[in-house]
């Protein structure tokens, strides 16, 4: 899903469901999809949900495998 972008959210899918879709995508190693979702949520005035998405993206960045460790 890295590189996936959209301008707005057109339905009322819960943020937890959207995050699950991103997390289930293979490979889920890049923070970009989470940052993209956070950006769209923030633009829609959903700051709390945007923070939740950004936190998930940060967890991806901090995984040991991203640093070349197992």
Image (cartoon, rainbow, N blue to C red):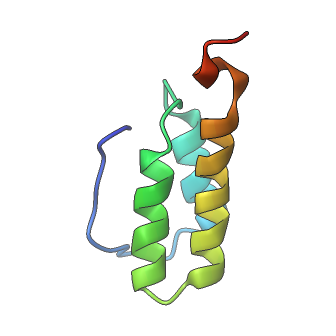
| Left or right, residue 44 beside residue 70 | left
Q: Residue at x 47, y 76 (%)?
A: 41
Q: Residue at x 28, y 62 (%)?
A: 6
Residue 67 position (above or below residue 30): above
Q: Residue at x 67, y 65 (%)?
A: 52
In this view, the residue in front, 52 or 63, is 63
In this view, the residue in front, 36 or 13, is 36
Q: Residue at x 58, y 49 (%)?
A: 57
| Residue 11 rendering spot, x and y as whole percentages | 42, 75
| Residue 30 rendering spot, x and y as whole percentages | 48, 36
Q: Quadrant of residue 69?
A: top right
| Residue 60 rendering spot, x and y as whole percentages | 62, 38
Residue 3 position (above or below residue 39): above
| Residue 70 rendering spot, x and y as whole percentages | 73, 9
Q: How many marks?
A: 0
Location of the N terminus by quadrant is top left
Q: Quadrant of residue 59?
A: top right
Residue found at the far top of this picture: 70
Residue 54 position (above or below residue 8): above
Q: Quadrant of residue 64?
A: top right
Residue found at the far bottom of this picture: 45
| Left or right, residue 66 beside residue 7 | right
């Amino acid at each position: 899903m890295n590189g996936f972008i959209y301008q707005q959210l057109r339905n009322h899918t819960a943020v937890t469901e959207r995050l699950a879709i991103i997390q289930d995508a293979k490979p889920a190693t890049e923070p970009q999809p989470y940052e993209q979702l956070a950006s769209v949520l923030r633009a829609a005035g959903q700051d709390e949900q945007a923070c939740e998405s950004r936190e998930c993206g940060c967890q991806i960045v901090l995984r040991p495998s991203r640093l070349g460790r197992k």
